[in-house]
Image: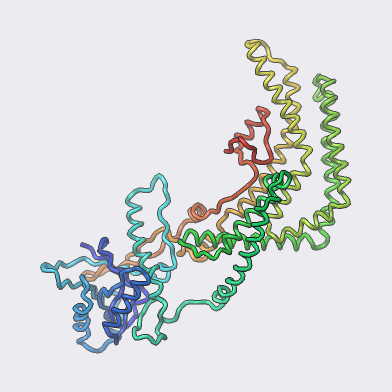
Amino acid sequence: MVLKVFFPSCCSSAESGILIGRWISEQNSAVILAVVHFPFIPVQVKQYLSEVQRVTKVSVSVLGSWSNSKQEKEESLSEFLEDLGTIFSHEPWIQISKEGDSKFWSCSTLQKQSNNPKEEEIILVYYDQRKVMLSHLHPPLATATSTDHKADDASKLSAVFDTVAKSKILFMTDRYDDGPIKLTHWQSDGVEASIIVELMKQASVPACMLLTFLLSLISGICRSRVLKFWPLSFLWSKLSTCEQLGHRLQHLQVISSNKKAQNQTQLMRKANIFVSLLIDVALGILLMSWLYRKNRIGHLADTLIPVADHVAEELQDLLQWLMGAPAGLKMNRALDQVLGRFFLYHIHLWISYIHLMSPFIEMILWYVGLSACLGLTVALCILSDIIALLTFHIYCFYVYGARLYCLKIYGLSSLWRLFRGKKWNVLRQRVDSCSYDLDQLRLLVVIVQGLIHLLVDLIDSLPLYSIILRLCRSYRLAAGVKFRVLEQQDGKPLRLLMQVNPLSYGSVIQTYRLPTYSCYPKDSWTSLCKKLFLGELIYPWKHKGEKQD
C-alpha cells in the first residue's frame, strides 16, 4: 500500500526534532504541520498537542521524527529518534532524514505493533504551507463532464487543505516566543501581520456600530407607514433610483453587521460587496468632480433645450409626412388628420413643459450631480429616470399606436377567418404601417435604458474583490492541485511538488456573482419582438400578472 507524506517545504532546513501533524487513516496519508526541536519534554509536547486539538478540533499528534544530518554531530541521534516512537506510540512511526545538501531524502516507517511488518511504498509530497492555509479549495462545478471520480479526488484534497487551514493556532508561535516548545513552520521566523490592517480592524468596530445605528434608523423610516401610501409607494416601486438606494441599503447592512462570516462563501460575499461599494462611490466622486469643473453642468443645461426642440421638430416633420401622402400612398385623410393633430398636440404640451422648466433645469442638474457621491450606479439610475420622464410623450405615442395597431391585428385576424382564401385588404395594411415609426422610437428608448441598467447591474453583481484576488493572489481561490515530479532515484521515495491550481475567471464570476435587483422587466429580444409585432404593450416597469423571461 502506498503511504503519502505531505511535507511543508518551509521545514526542509529545520533542525532535527519530531514531526507533528494529522494522520488520515482513510487515505493512508500523513499531513506534516510543524517540526518540534530539541530540547523538549514529552509531557509538555503532549499537553500542547491536546490543547491544540481542543481548539482546532483536529486530531494533531506526533507522527514521527525528522533528522537533519547537516545540523547534527552525534552518531547516536538516529537511535534516539527511533526510541521516541515508544514514547509517543504512533503507528506507523515515520522517519524522515536529510543527508547534508543532498536532494534525495530517506523516508521509512516503523511498525512495532505489527506481527508481519510490510515495507510500504512512500511518496513524499512537498507543499507550500502558506498558500495551502490561505487558499480555499472549491468543489468541482456541476457540469456535464463532472464525474464521481473528480468529486472523490476533491474530497481527499479537501481533507489536506482543511487540516492546514484549521491548524492556524499552531502557526501563531514563532522562534521569539518564550514558551517551552520551539516549532518550525511557515511563520516560525515571525508572525505575518500588518500594522495598517490591525489599526483598520480596531477603527472598524466603532465605525460599524455607528453605521449600524444609522442604517437601522433609515430602515425604520423606510418601513414606516408614511411610505406605504399610494403616491410614495408607487414611486418607490417604479423608479430605478429608489430600487438602487434600497439595494445599497441592504449592502450596507450586510457590511456593517457584527455577525462573523460562518464560511468562505459568506466572507467572500461581504468582501465583494465592500469592494463593489467602494469602487462605485469612487467612480461617483470622479463623475461629480468632472461635472462641477469648468461649468459643465451649465453647458449641459444649455444643450438640453436645443436637443429637445430638435427632437420635437423631427417628430412634427414625421407626423406632417404621415398626415399627407407618404411615399405617394393614398391614406384615409380624415383618420390621418385626427391622429396627426392628436399627436401634434402632445408634442406641443411636451415642448411647453420643457420650456417652462428651463429656468430650473440647471439647478435640478446641480442637485442631481450631488447624488453621484452615493455611487455611480445611483447617478446612472437617476439618469435613467430622467430619460424616462423626458421621453414620456414618446411612450404615450407608443401606447396609442400599439393599441390601434393591436385593434387592427384583431380586425385582420377576424377578416382572415371570415374571408379565408380571398385577397388581402391593402388599405388596412397601409394603416397598420403607421405605428411602426413609433415602435422604433420606443425601441430606441428601451435600448438606451437597457444599456444604462446593464451597466448598473454589472457594477452591482460583478464580484470585484474575487476578481482582484484571483489576479493578485491566485492561490487564494483554488480549483485543485497539480503535482510535478522532482528528481527520482532508485531506493529513495518518490518526490512530488504539489502546486495550487487557481480557479478560472469564469468560475470565479459564476461562483461569487452577487444577486441583482431591478424594478424593470427582464424581457428577452424574442419577447420584445413578439410584443411589437402583435401590438402588445411593453411596460417600463414590472407589471403584475406578466411573466418575465
Which residue corresponds to the image point at 20% horizontal and 87% vertical from the top-left? 75
- Answer with the quarter of the image where residue 344 lies: top right
**Residue 151 image point, x, y percent:** 35, 53
Percent position of residue 465, x then y: 55, 61
Quadrant in the rendering for residue 404: top right
Residue beneath the point at 14% across and 69% down: 114
Q: Is residue 281 above or below residue 102?
A: above
Q: Is residue 149 visible?
A: yes
Q: In the picture shown, does residue 456 fall above or below 206?
A: above
The image quadrant of residue 514 is bottom right
Q: Which residue, as the protein is rendered here, is positioned at the far front?
A: 225
Q: Is residue 239 visible?
A: no
> Would you place residue 356 above or below residue 214 in this image?
above
Q: How is the image coloured?
A: rainbow
Q: Farthest residue in the bottom direction?
A: 73
**The N terminus sits in image quarter:** bottom left
Quadrant location, the C terminus: top right
Q: Residue at x 66, y 16 (%)?
A: 414
Left or right? Give the position of 31 relative to 269. left
Q: Is residue 361 left or right of residue 403?
A: right
In this rendered view, identify the residue nearer to me: 254 or 124.
254
The total number of labels drawn is 0
Q: Please say if 314 is above or below 18.
A: above
The residue furthest left is 115
Q: Is residue 124 left or right of residue 214?
A: left
Residue 502 placement (x, y as % from top left): 45, 60
Residue sitting nearer the eye, 339 or 147: 339
